[in-house]
Image: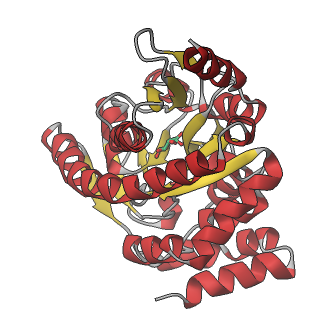
Amino acid sequence: MLRISKLLAATFAIGSLTIGAATAESVLRSADTHPDGYPTVEAVKYMGELLKQRTNGRYSVEVYHSAQLGEEKDTIEQTQTGVIDLNRVSMGPFNGIVPETQVPSLPYMFRSVDQMRHVMDGPIGDEILKAFEAHDLVGLAFYDSGARSFYNTKKDITSIADLKGMKFRVIQSDVFVDMVNALGANATPMAYGEVYSALETGVIDGAENNWPSFESAKHYEVAKHYTIDQHQIVPEVLVMSKASWEKLAPEDQAIVRQAAKDSVVKMRELWDAQEKKSRDIVEKAGVKISEIDKQPLIDAMKPVYDKYLSTPELKDLAARIQATK
Ligand code: GTR
């Protein structure tokens, strides 16, 4: 009885944790905008399984996929206040909160997905994870998001001039807004869940994302032109609410952190397979894929870099990323 009541007390102490009827286990609530089966959703579920095994069932994770807990901007706030325990989000919506996330979000900052993985797996990644702590969050691990490219409902884009005047939805981040505007197009920041109907009704001409998002959000049904410009390789991040974190015993904190790190390997396997599957689905559905010379786009980013690499620390972070093989 004592044991049960202790468990219950521990359970209630953690913001949104709920109680499993038979086991008195504590369930961490985790948010994700993507549908069930998407690599990020499956990776967090896997992390939850590891956590359950390693705490002998005391903790587990329930993933609320498909934006059930809200759009990314809102779920981030709820994670900061401890209403949501865990959150898997793109770095983009963190750009206005954690300045260090602006650097890996800059267009053409990484040369390849491999280089991005290498950077985020090393000391630079640890440093950026740590930066979340000043903002009521604990950075646990980075996931992948491949490369983001433009797609639209109107035409094939084969040169920078084709982007002129087109209206593209972007993540709610000034880095993304400035990137699109610097290319001569017009940026419309908007929540992910609104993009499909905005494309369909012509509120926007296009958006930008990786293959799995373009496919799973069904944007390809309405936007039939995809340009491989790969302007951003933006890592995704799994964060925990600091409020939830601080209620865990130190040994449980270590188990959570390790389970999150261990889920990265799983995520990458799933991601690599999903990119191929998603590209195949959209190609079969008749999406026209075009190539573009990236150099003029890279050159156009100079003012964006000047604006965001605004302190010696951020400049140094960028230089260290670029110097990593
Ligand atoms: C996806 C990312 C999501 C979300 C989405 C968007 O690539 O995985 O977390 O940020 O992009 O464009 O809103």
Toward the right, the furthest residue is 311
Q: Which of 18 and 125 is in front in this view?
A: 18
Residue drawn at point x = 51 percent, y = 63 percent: 232
Q: Can residue 111 be seen in this view?
A: yes
Q: Is residue 98 left or right of residue 91?
A: right
Toward the top, the furthest residue is 21
Compared with 160, 137 (above or below) is: above
How many numbered marks have been drawn onto this rendered protein structure?
0
Q: Where residue 64 sits: x, y (%)?
A: 47, 24
Residue drawn at point x = 67 percent, y = 65 percent: 128
Q: Where residue 185 sits: x, y (%)?
A: 61, 52
Q: In which quarter of the image is residue 305?
A: bottom right
Q: Is residue 35 left or right of residue 69?
A: left
Compared with 9, 53 (above or below) is: below
Compared with 7, 322 (above or below) is: below
Which quadrant, please, contains the N terminus? top right
Toward the left, the furthest residue is 284
Residue drawn at point x = 67 percent, y = 79 percent: 318
Q: Which of 25 and 91 is in front in this view?
A: 25
Q: Which of 169 and 247 is in front in this view?
A: 247
Q: Where residue 7 sits: x, y (%)?
A: 59, 22
Q: Where residue 153 sits: x, y (%)?
A: 40, 37
Q: Is residue 236 visible?
A: no
